[in-house]
Image (cartoon, rainbow, N blue to C red):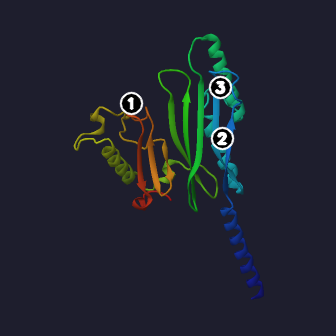
Amino acid sequence: MKAFSIILLLALIGCHSSKEERQSLSFSKKEFVTEPCSAEPCAKVKIGWEEAVGADAGTHINKAVLSHLLAYFRQDTVFADLATAAEDFVTSYNRFKQDFPDSPGGWTIEIDSEKTYESDSLVSIKFTEFNFTGGAHPNSSVNFLNFDKNSGSLLSEEQLILDQEKFLELAEQAFREYHQVEKGVALKDDGRFFLPDTGFFIPNAFGYEGDKLKLIYIPYEIGPYSLGYTELEFGLDELEGMVKK
């Protein structure tokens, strides 16, 4: 009986320790900014991001966040860190100005991220990005990374949506209402939207913010630049059984 009591006590301590470890994950804001320009126009980089602190999960989250931030720079180059990516961005601008000295304006890339949702099992980080490298207009984007809080693993749309068919139906109805698509008119026949052969789809920007689940279609994703952003939101209470929380 004494031995059993000791084993039970150790098990309870182990469970308590595991719970403390799961809850030890926290976040702090970090920032990277290029040196001030010696003359205007020039190239500027400003990045803010959430760094996970504590627990093994934090290491995996930070690795995914860094990879996501670096992906905003040149796609044909693998950068080791933000400083290297920013240096390449500035160098590319300087070379461009040498070739086209009369080209007006500078280049800029600004990225910010924030933790928008945290539960016992999930963490969502939202990224907003703005860039200008010449052309008719600047570009911008929004995205989310969703993580398993305990392991730090990145969660896919398929892992988050528990009932794909029902959720897609709900999202399409909200999309139709947002854009005031006439009843009985198929989205593919409306004329305003870019749709694949498979039809309506969930956007890349899929994540949690506050007590809402948000779907954000960025310009060119489902329509022309002039269509702008399409932001749909759903209360988590109305998604019971359809998505993880």
First-in-chain label (3 vs 2) = 2
The residues tagged by marks 3 and 2 sit, at their Cα atoms, a distance apart of 17 Å
Residue 224 seen in this snapshot: no
The residues tagged by marks 1 and 2 sit, at their Cα atoms, a distance apart of 31 Å
**115 relative position to 172: left or right:** right
The 10 Å Cα crowd at callout 3, few under 14, some 14 to 19, many 20 or more, is many
Residue for badge 3: 89
- Tell me residue 104's x, y (percent): 56, 17
- Tell me residue 111's x, y (percent): 59, 37
Residue at coordinates 73% horizontally, 79% vertically from top-left? 9
Residue for badge 1: 226
Three-letter code, disc 1: Ser
Residue at coordinates 46% horizontally, 53% vertically from top-left? 213
The image quarter containing residue 48 is: top right
Residue at coordinates 34% horizontally, 48% vertically from top-left? 174
- Tell me residue 102's x, y (percent): 58, 11
Three-letter code, disc 3: Phe
Q: Nearer the viewer, mark 1 or mark 2?
A: 1
1 and 3 marks in contact (CB < 8 Å): no
Q: Secondary structure at mark 3?
A: helix
Residue at coordinates 59% horizontally, 22% vertically from top-left? 106
Residue for badge 2: 66
The image quarter containing residue 117 is: bottom right
